């Protein structure tokens, strides 16, 4: 079993420390607000003297600035810092240099589950950085989740993480618009929920509604067939959806932005192509 120091004891870091302990690892914990360590000390963790106290530091904080603030001027010679916090890919690349400048190695990660799912079979984390270092600590990190290595560029784990969050936030916000609109006609959110669940299942599946996969195939090929459902038809259709929201007296900002995007692709002369052609507009803002 390994020794691991968890830096940052918000909901995520606390559950990570608990999960490492349950897996039999020797765990030290550090948090800016020291009192948050108490429940973990009661479970067998040791209080780290500083944020840099340990050879394997697993960091989970609000942003990378918190890591700079926590580690301060500490030397990191021979240490591996695995940071699972959110930030931008650019910041992660700068952080890799910052850690290297102090003698350590940075592995970046984007963990794709909320606290209750840490350690469950469904959990996975995108990791990037030197592959041999990830492999060296794979066994320890697997206590938290599956280790999904995406490449040596330290910014990449965050790009995968944010790609998933874009899907998460935008699809769930659309679900909120849908429920809010139906509610104005007296429809219970619970009556609609099974239909929304069916949409999510179908969109992610392999059948004729499996647009997640077919859009990827179309983008890879650079061909967006629109004979059966043209973008122009959908640009008009989303206009109706925006009007429906406005008629119902609910918020339209996000659907209006989608409408503008569709209309731009249509105005650029690609209305006869399929919905996938919108990605070409997204690529050229
Ligand atoms: P927060 O994002 O709220 O982070 C809280 C932690 O950051 C605390 O330990 C806090 O210390 C520390 N912190 C904030 N600012 C500083 C600073 N300047 N110096 C030192 N420490 C600082 O909590 P979460 O646990 O929810 O999230 C941690 C990370 O995990 C985030 O980047 C988040 O995006 C990511 N994440 C969260 C998920 C979730 O469901 N919660 C899911 C997947 C990823 P203090 O206690 O002293 O305030």
Image (cartoon, rainbow, N blue to C red):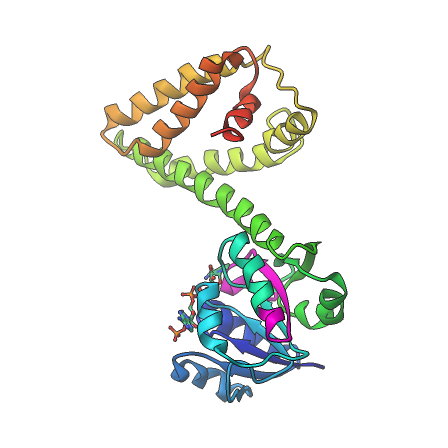
- Image-based side of 267 in relation to 223, left or right: left
In reply to whether residue 108 is colored magenta, the answer given is yes
- Residue drawn at the location 50% of the way across and 47% of the way down: 165
Along the viewing direction, whichever of 232 and 22 lies nearer the viewer: 232
Would you identify the image quadrant in which residue 18 lies?
bottom right
Residue 76 painted magenta: no
Residue 96 in the image: above or below residue 29: above
Q: Position of residue 50 (x, y in %)?
A: 50, 85
Q: Position of residue 79 (x, y in %)?
A: 65, 77
Compared across the picture, whether 108 is left or right of 260 comes to: right
Residue 193 vs 147, above or below: the answer is above
Q: Is residue 130 above or below residue 35?
A: above
Query: Which quarter of the rendered image does ligand 1 occupy?
Result: bottom left
Judged from this view, the residue extending furthest toward the front is 101
Question: Is 152 on the left or on the right of 35, as rendered?
Answer: right
The residue under the point 44% across, 71% down is: 10
What residue is drawn where x is 70% and y is 25%?
Answer: 221
Count of labels in the image: 0
| Residue range (magenta) | 99-119
Q: Is residue 203 above or below residue 168?
A: above
Q: Nearer the viewer, residue 2 or 195?
A: 2
- For the N terminus, the quadrant is bottom right
Q: Position of residue 163 (x, y in %)?
A: 55, 45
Find residue 69 and report its image quarter: bottom left
Q: Position of residue 190 (x, y in %)?
A: 38, 41
Of 98 and 4, nearer the camera is 98
């Amino acid at each position: 079993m390994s020794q691991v120091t968890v830096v940052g004891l918000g909901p995520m870091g606390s559950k990570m420390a608990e999960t490492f302990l349950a897996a039999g690892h020797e765990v030290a914990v550090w948090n800016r607000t020291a009192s948050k360590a108490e429940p973990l000390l009661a479970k067998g963790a040791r209080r780290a003297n500083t944020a840099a106290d340990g050879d394997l530091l697993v960091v989970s904080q609000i942003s990378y600035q918190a890591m700079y603030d926590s580690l301060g001027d500490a030397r990191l010679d021979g240490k591996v810092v695995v940071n699972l916090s959110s930030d931008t890919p650019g910041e992660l690349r700068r952080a890799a240099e910052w850690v290297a400048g102090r003698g350590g190695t940075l592995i970046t990660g984007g963990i794709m589950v909320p606290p209750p799912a840490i350690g469950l079979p469904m959990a996975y984390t995108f990791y990037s950085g030197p592959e041999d270092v990830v492999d060296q600590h794979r066994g320890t990190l697997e206590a938290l989740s599956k280790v999904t290595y995406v490449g040596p560029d330290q910014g990449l784990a965050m790009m995968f993480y944010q790609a998933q969050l874009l899907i998460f936030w935008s699809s769930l916000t659309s679900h909120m618009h849908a429920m809010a609109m139906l509610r104005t006609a007296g429809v219970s959110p619970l009556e609609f929920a099974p239909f929304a669940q069916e949409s999510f299942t179908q969109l992610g599946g392999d059948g004729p509604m499996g647009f997640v996969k077919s859009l990827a195939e179309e983008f890879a090929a650079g061909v967006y067939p629109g004979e059966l459902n043209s973008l122009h038809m959908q640009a008009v259709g989303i206009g109706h959806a925006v009007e429906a929201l406005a008629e119902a007296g609910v918020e339209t900002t996000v659907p209006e932005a989608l409408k503008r995007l569709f209309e731009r692709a249509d105005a650029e002369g690609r209305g006869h192509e399929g919905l996938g052609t919108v990605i070409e507009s997204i690529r050229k803002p």
